[in-house]
């Protein structure tokens, strides 16, 4: 009994002793963010990051994938004109990549269709004619995807438009992750082929033409056509079906 009491007393004493030595972490000698410093010449406690620092998970080495731009093409000047509805028109795309940087599979196109219907169809319309609901209610009409200019535009241009916006259209980088942007581009290509099987700049020339021919044989069954376009696109891509 006495032993227990003594032990209890000792514990309490130790606790007090411990409290006496307490050294709070919040009182440690360190700088607050943006605090002034007398130590550094520029008076700032916050230091610049060493050059080339990359945040974990943000090493974006694959330029084509992350920007849709070609390696080594810099200082690009392109001429733009304005069309009748005030849209910005460009016809040369010197730094946009022409090939998809990831394999185009059926899954990718399906994903693109889903994302397109969520983010783009409200303005560009379900088939890309530029007659979405927002446009019907008065927003600027975007150009159709089915004129020669956009049919011949390289995939990197579409990716760039989604990422950075274009003229009066906002960029969607904040809402749509990189791979999904490519998925949407793949779906736009599918829409273009569907609307004009012969006139689309082939993703991979010859094989896509074959897809278009196959489509023309069966103009009446549109659902089937769509899935055929998808399979053909998937087959013909760099890297093949994966
Ligand atoms: C709020 C309406 C709106 C939404 C949503 C929208 N766009 Fe646009 N888009 C426009 C308008 C308007 C233009 C024409 C802008 C201009 O030229 O000033 C345009 C232009 C474009 C162009 C043509 C660029 C060129 O070279 O002429 C592409 C491609 C495009 N949008 C793709 C997309 C994709 C993909 C999405 C979905 C991720 C999307 N847009 C969502 C309104 C929209």
Image (spheres, rainbow, N blue to C red):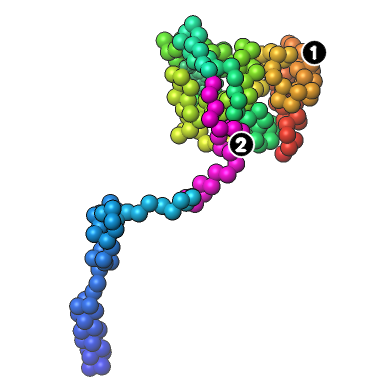
Question: x and y percent of residue 64 in the render?
Answer: 61, 36
- How many numbered marks are there? 2
Indicate the secondary structure of the residue bearing disc 1: helix
Quarter residue 9 falls in? bottom left
The answer to whether residue 209 is visible is: yes
| Depth check, front residue: 156 or 126 | 156
In the image, residue 197 above or below residue 241: above
Tell me, for residue 1, which label it has, or none: none
Mostly what secondary structure, the magenta segment? loop
Residue at 22% of width from left, 93% of height from top?
A: 2
Residue 196 as seen in the image, left or right of residue 26: right
Residue at 79% of width from left, 24% of height from top?
A: 207
Magenta segment includes 58: yes
| Depth check, front residue: 227 or 197 | 197
| Depth check, front residue: 133 or 1 | 133
In the image, residue 218 above or below residue 179: above
Q: Is mark 1 within 8 Å of ligand 1?
A: no
In the image, residue 128 above or below residue 118: above
Tell me, for residue 217, which label it has, or none: 1
Residue 101 as seen in the image, left or right of residue 132: right
Question: Which quadrant does the C terminus fall into?
Answer: top right
Magenta segment includes 191: no
Indicate the secondary structure of the residue bearing disc 2: loop
Question: x and y percent of residue 201 in the render?
Answer: 69, 19
The reply to whether discs 1 and 2 touch (Cβ–Cβ < 8 Å) is no
Between circles 1 and 2, the one closer to the viewer is 2
Residue under numbered circle 2: 71
Q: Identify the mark nearer the N-term, 1 or 2.
A: 2
Question: x and y percent of residue 13 in the render?
Answer: 20, 84
Region of the chain picked out in magenta, as a range: 55-78
Is the residue marked by circle 2 packed among few (<14), some (14-19), or many (20+) residues within 10 Å? few
């Amino acid at each position: 009994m006495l032993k227990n009491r003594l032990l209890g007393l000792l514990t309490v004493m130790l606790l007090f002793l411990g409290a006496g030595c307490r050294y709070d972490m919040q009182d440690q000698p360190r700088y607050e963010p943006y605090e002034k410093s007398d130590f550094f010449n520029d008076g700032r406690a916050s230091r610049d990051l060493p050059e080339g620092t990359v945040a974990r998970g943000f090493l974006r080495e694959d330029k084509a994938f992350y920007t849709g731009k070609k390696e080594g093409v810099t200082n690009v000047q392109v001429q733009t004109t304005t069309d009748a509805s005030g849209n910005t028109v460009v016809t040369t795309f010197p730094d946009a990549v022409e090939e998809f940087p990831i394999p185009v599979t059926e899954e990718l196109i399906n994903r693109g269709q889903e994302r397109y219907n969520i983010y783009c169809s409200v303005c560009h319309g379900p088939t890309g004619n530029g007659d979405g609901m927002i446009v019907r209610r008065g927003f600027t009409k975007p150009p159709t995807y089915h004129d020669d200019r956009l049919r011949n535009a390289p995939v990197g241009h579409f990716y760039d438009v989604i990422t950075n916006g274009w003229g009066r259209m906002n960029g969607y980088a904040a809402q749509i992750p990189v791979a999904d942007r490519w998925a949407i581009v793949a779906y736009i290509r599918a829409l273009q082929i569907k609307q004009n099987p012969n006139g689309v700049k082939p993703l991979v020339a010859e094989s896509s033409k074959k897809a278009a021919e196959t489509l023309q044989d069966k103009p009446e069954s549109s659902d089937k056509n769509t899935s055929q376009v998808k399979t053909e696109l998937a087959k013909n891509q760099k890297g093949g079906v994966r």
